[in-house]
Amino acid sequence: MISRRAWAALLVLTAGIALMVVSYLVLAAPWGFPPESEKFSNPRLAFAPLLFIIGVMIAFLAAVVYELWPQRGGKE
């Protein structure tokens, strides 16, 4: 069975990946034709790359959550 700390780390990892996907596909990479048009080369949200970087940081924090969350019934 999966431990509580693994669930917490998986939840943090999922949140980070979700933020990365949304910030890249929805906010930073608008689709359209013609692709060389300035309208489709600029992100919809000016700080979308920052949100993507924050998503990467949150995803990497999943390992920190897993390591720092105390293991139930185990040795410290």
Image (spheres, rainbow, N blue to C red):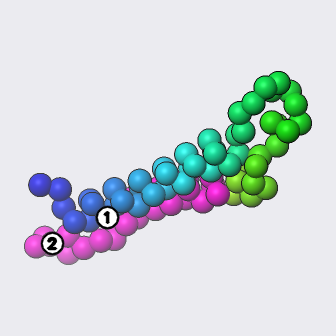
User: Is residue 36 toward the left or the right of residue 29 in the image?
Assistant: right
Report whether residue 60 is seen. Answer: no
Which residue in the structure is indicated by mark 1?
A: 8
Q: Residue 41, image x and y in percent?
A: 82, 37
- Cβ atoms at labels 1 and 2 below 8 Å apart: no
Residue type, numbered disc 2: Arg
Q: Percent x, y for residue 15?
A: 45, 57
Tell me what residue is drawn at x 20 percent, y 70 percent: 71
Which residue ends up furthest to the right in the rendered image?
38
The crowding category of the residue bearing disc 1, from other C-alpha atoms within 10 Å (few below 14, some 14 to 19, many at least 20), is some
Q: 4 or 39: which is nearer to us?
A: 39
Is residue 45 magenta-colored? Answer: no
What SS does tag 2 mark?
loop
- Residue type at mark 1 is Ala
Residue 29: quadrant of the picture: top right
Q: Which quadrant does the C terminus fall into?
A: bottom left
- Of residue 15 and residue 6, the one placed in the foreground of this image is 15
Which-is-in-front pick, marks 1 and 2? 1
Q: Position of residue 61 (x, y in %)?
A: 46, 62
Q: Is residue 17 visible?
A: yes
Residue 72: numbered disc: 2
Q: Main secondary structure of the magenta part?
A: helix
